[in-house]
Image: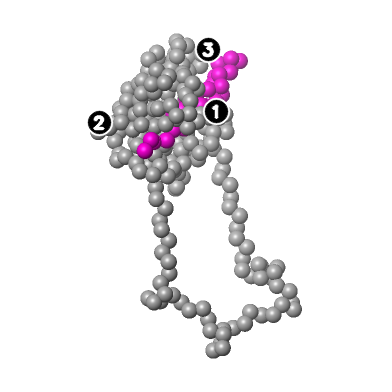
């Protein structure tokens, strides 16, 4: 976003892409926790068996083994979990948030060579942007949009009023195919830039979701924004 003292643009940085998640964000993410390693069968047996414990009996003719399921005794199939319905891919063109009077044509921006996110220009009236390495709004996964909280002249940016959104407020995204993806505001969160929860914001989701990201936490001593504010919204079905 833009420093109020210097007019300097404060951008978004993007960590590397992980195999199972789309990772590109406004700060660093904590390393995912390391899963506990399962105890080996040998060590489990040694810890739980006393020297006097009887050995497990070996199946014999008088103690038959459990039969393997056959055509006459089929195993019960496990039903695949159902996923929320989504829309086909279509590039977004316009963002409209009626409750806060925010409307913007959308730029399509990606990553710079240094892996930081491209951001829209900061002059007055500059539009928001869709991060084009994220899903299109309405597709499965989190579509990501960036916008300034203020402009180079210190005036309001396109995302200046995101904090006024309330649960249930509607966020409309018009798409190239003529359809509108309608999202419902769930919550907003403020994060320190050096503690940005990358997987929470950019990680895969079961349904279609939307993330709106801007700067927050203006520090008058430095003229910088120390935080980011993230809106979480889900596709209405």
Note whether residue 34 is visible: yes
Mark 1 and mark 2: span between their CA atoms? 33 Å
Q: Which residue is mark 2?
A: 178
Query: Picture coordinates of residue 26 (x, y %)?
Result: 49, 31
Q: Which residue is mark 3?
A: 5
> Is 194 on the left or on the right of 145, as rendered?
right
Query: Picture coordinates of residue 47 (x, y %)?
Result: 70, 68
Mark 3 and mark 2: span between their CA atoms? 42 Å
Magenta span of residues: 211-237
Query: Picture coordinates of residue 65 (x, y %)?
Result: 53, 81
Magenta segment includes 212: yes
Asked if disc 3 and disc 2 are in contact, CB closer than 8 Å, the reply is: no
Q: Nearer the viewer, mark 1 or mark 3?
A: 1
- Secondary structure state at the residue bearing disc 2: loop
Residue 194 versus residue 129: which sits nearer the camera? 129
Query: Picture coordinates of residue 45 (x, y %)?
Result: 66, 70
In the rendered view, would you say 26 is above or below 46? above
> Is 149 on the left or on the right of 85, as rendered?
right
Q: If the image is split into quadrants, where does the C terminus sit? A: top left
Residue farthest to the left, as pictured: 177
Residue 157 versus residue 82: which sits nearer the camera? 82
Magenta segment includes 119: no
């Amino acid at each position: 976003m833009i420093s109020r003292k210097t007019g300097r643009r404060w951008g978004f940085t993007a960590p590397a892409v992980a195999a199972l998640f789309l990772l590109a964000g406004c700060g660093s993410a904590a390393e995912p926790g390391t899963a506990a390693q399962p105890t080996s069968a040998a060590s489990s047996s040694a810890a739980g068996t006393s020297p006097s414990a009887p050995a497990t009996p070996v199946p014999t003719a008088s103690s038959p083994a459990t039969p393997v399921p056959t055509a006459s005794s089929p195993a019960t199939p496990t039903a695949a979990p159902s996923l929320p319905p989504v829309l086909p891919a279509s590039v977004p063109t316009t963002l409209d948030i009626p409750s806060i009077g925010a409307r913007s044509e959308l730029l399509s921006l990606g990553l710079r060579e240094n892996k930081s996110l491209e951001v829209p220009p900061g002059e007055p009236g500059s539009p928001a942007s869709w991060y084009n390495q994220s899903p299109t709004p309405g597709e499965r996964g989190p579509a990501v949009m960036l916008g300034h909280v203020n402009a180079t002249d210190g005036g309001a940016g396109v995302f200046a009023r995101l904090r006024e959104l309330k649960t249930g407020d509607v966020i409309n995204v018009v798409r190239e195919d003529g359809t509108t993806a309608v999202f419902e505001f769930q919550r907003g969160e403020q994060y320190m830039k050096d503690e940005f929860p990358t997987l929470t914001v950019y990680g895969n989701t079961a349904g279609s979701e939307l993330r709106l990201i801007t700067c927050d936490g203006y520090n008058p001593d430095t003229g910088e924004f120390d935080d980011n504010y993230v809106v979480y919204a889900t596709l209405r079905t």
